[in-house]
Amino acid sequence: MNIPPDQLYLDLLKKTLSFSLWPDPPVPAETFAYRRSALSRSAVTLAGKALKRGRYRLVEDRQFSRQQREDGMIWPGYADTMIGLKRLDNLQQCIESALRDDVPGDIIETGVWRGGACILARAVLAAHGVTDRRVFVADSFEGLPKPDADTHPADKDDTHHVHGFLAISQEQVAENFRKYGLLDGQVVFLKGWFKDTLPTAPIERLAVMRLDGDMYGSTIDALNSLYPRLSSGGYCIIDDYALEGCKQAVTDYRAAHGIHAEMTAIDWTGTYWRKA
């Protein structure tokens, strides 16, 4: 095999970010305890405290198939991304296509969790020696917002805001960049709800925009603020198209703005198109 070193590096990075090189170890039982009943949560807490006194830890065993991991169908305990290898491959391909075609602009992800996709984006720029483009890391860093059903009825029954597992601090995401050697001036954090941060974000043009907001409101806010700044030939990637709220937001935006570019499926939930 004669694989270029930069591609070997990016391939290894994707496998590391997605924790694909190793079986998922058991996770601390308290990680997902918030999903349990109050009685069950109390039992887990008490048992955990008792075990810690003996320098032990209560854990939950979680087994996933290779397909589930590649398709990003799980909430992993140790990976730095939950989007799976197929969507990581797509992000790399879109960025490299934009670089080859000299599509002007920066890269942004809205909704970053532990930062894995943004770390990959920064790595792609580094691997290609690109120093004049930035990676914008946009998130509340507090989890997802409570649904605003009055403004966005499609989000009426959305429950993403109850999942504490999705709330990762900006400090932790920055540390994740640092541990891969990729935290520098080309990484820009946008902390806050999208409706507040994106309209005034210091972005002139985008080459790639990746939206991972799950909900109607988060998706439509990102599209409204960012799509007009996406360069011709740039890529719009939607992570959560399998979720009804997100899908409806994409459908509504494309219809309102006469966007007819063909959408291409990445896997069971990811999709993307190239701006004409």
Image (spheres, rainbow, N blue to C red):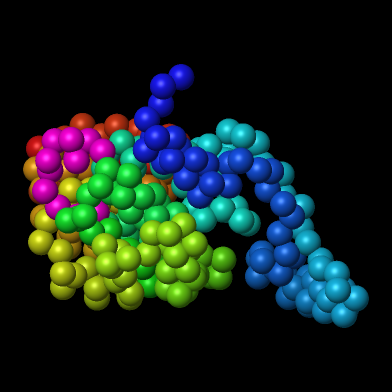
Determine if the magenta segment contains residue 162: no
Which residue is at a point 49% across and 53% down the rendered structure image? 81
Residue drawn at 33 percent across, 75 percent down: 192
The answer to whether residue 86 of the structure is visible from this angle is: no
Residue at 41% x, 22% y: name it. 2
- Most foreground residue, 86 or 135: 135
Residue 126 picture location, percent across and down: 31, 50
Image side of residue 34 versus residue 270, left or right: right
Q: Is residue 71 left or right of residue 214?
A: right
Name the image quarter holding residue 219: bottom left
Q: Range of the magenta residues?
A: 96-107
The spot of residue 47 in percent (x, y) is 85, 74
Q: Is residue 204 left or right of residue 246?
A: left
| Among the 4 quarters of the image, the one containing residue 39 | bottom right
Vertical comparison of 5 with 219: above or below: above
Q: Position of residue 117 (x, y in %)?
A: 40, 52
Q: Point out the residue furthest to the right here.
A: 54
Whether residue 58 is visible here, answered yes or no, is yes
The answer to whether residue 46 is left or right of residue 89 is right
Residue 211: x and y in percent read: 31, 53
